[in-house]
Each structure stands twice: as C-alpha cells, then as structure tokens.
Image (cartoon, rainbow, N blue to C red):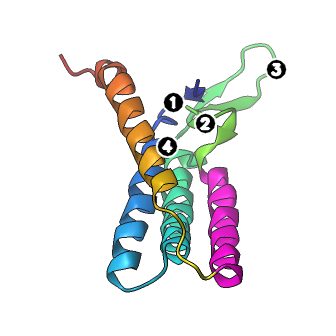
Amino acid sequence: MIVWSGNGYVLPLLVAVTVALGLVSGTALGLSDTHAVAVGYTLAAVATWIIGRRMNDPAKGYPMIDAKTGETVILRTRHTVFWVEVQWWAIPCALAAIGNGFRGALFPVSADPWPVVFVLVGLGLGGMVLGPFILRRLGAP
C-alpha cells in the first residue's frame, strides 16, 4: 500500500515513466540494460527534485495569524509519499542510479530483462487499480 498526501501519488508514476524512458533511450543508444536503467534513475532523480521542489514551495502557502499567540503561521499543502516530501525521493533515485551504474561496470554481461518487464507490468496494473481513484480525486466525472 502506498501512503501519500497531497499530490504525492505523482511520484511513482514519474519514476516509472522516467526509468522506462531511460531504459528505452539507453538501449537505443547501445548501452547495456543496467546502464540504461541507471540513466533512467538519473532522469527520475532530476525530475523528482525539480517537480517536488515546485510542488512543496513554501511560497505557495497561505499566511494566517494565530488568534491566541498573534504569531503568523503559514498553511500549505504538503505533497508526500510515505511521510517524506516528494523532492527528497530524488536521493534514493540517485542512489539507485549509482548502484545500477556500478552493477553494470562490475558485471558487464547484460542483465536478464524479465525483472524489468515484471516491474513495468506491475506498475501498469497498479495504475489501472489507482487510476479511477486518482481521476475521482482530480474531479473527473
């Protein structure tokens, strides 16, 4: 079960799309599967950081004054996945990119593509299950 708040549900979709894009473009450029996945995780790290920073921008908050203390409080929506703000998930993506890069350098034999296929199929099935919920949350009929 994935726990998110705000628009945190975007993170798994973003990572899946960027890793798949990196895998397709990396293999088209002649990279091994592990290096291609490393390229995908690098894209995911960059995209997650940029989009997460924009989603959790403190300037988007609403200032309010606390009636009891007179202190100004900024109210804003936090976009999180597993209680971690979206932009901080760029660090595990970068670590996965580094790990795949080392794995590709240490074991240059092309990896079996079936785990990637199973992950992509699993993400597709997860999208089919979560899709109606996400559309309802966005206000689609």
- Picture residue at 36% right of the left edge, 65% below the top: 21
Name the amino acid, label 4.
Pro
Closest to the observer, 81 or 123: 123
Is residue 105 part of the magenta span, yes or no? Answer: yes
Give me the disc on residue 80: 2
Q: Is residue 73 left or right of residue 61?
A: right
- Picture residue at 43% right of the left edge, 40% below the top: 123
Crowding at dot 3, Cα within 10 Å, few <14 / some 14-19 / many 20+, comes out as few
Q: N-terminal of the two: label 1 or label 3?
A: 1
Name the amino acid, label 1.
Gly
Q: Nearer the viewer, mark 4 or mark 3?
A: 4
Closest to the observer, 48 or 62: 48
Q: Is residue 66 left or right of residue 126?
A: right
Locate residue 34, reporting x and y percent: 55, 72
Q: Is residue 134 visible?
A: no
- For marks 4 and 1, give the CA distance: 14 Å
For the residue labelled by badge 1, is the local secondary structure a helix, a strand or a loop? loop
Q: Is residue 64 above or below residue 60?
A: above
Q: N-terminal of the two: label 2 or label 3?
A: 3
**Residue furthest out toward the right:** 69
Q: Nearer the viewer, mark 4 or mark 1?
A: 4
In contact (CB < 8 Å): disc 4 and disc 3:
no
Locate residue 114, reporting x and y percent: 46, 54
Closest to the observer, 10 or 77: 10
- The span shown in magenta is 87-107
Q: N-terminal of the two: label 2 or label 4?
A: 4
In contact (CB < 8 Å): disc 2 and disc 1:
yes
Q: Which residue is mark 3?
A: 69
Q: Is residue 112 above or below residue 71?
A: below
- Picture residue at 60% right of the left edge, 26% below the top: 3
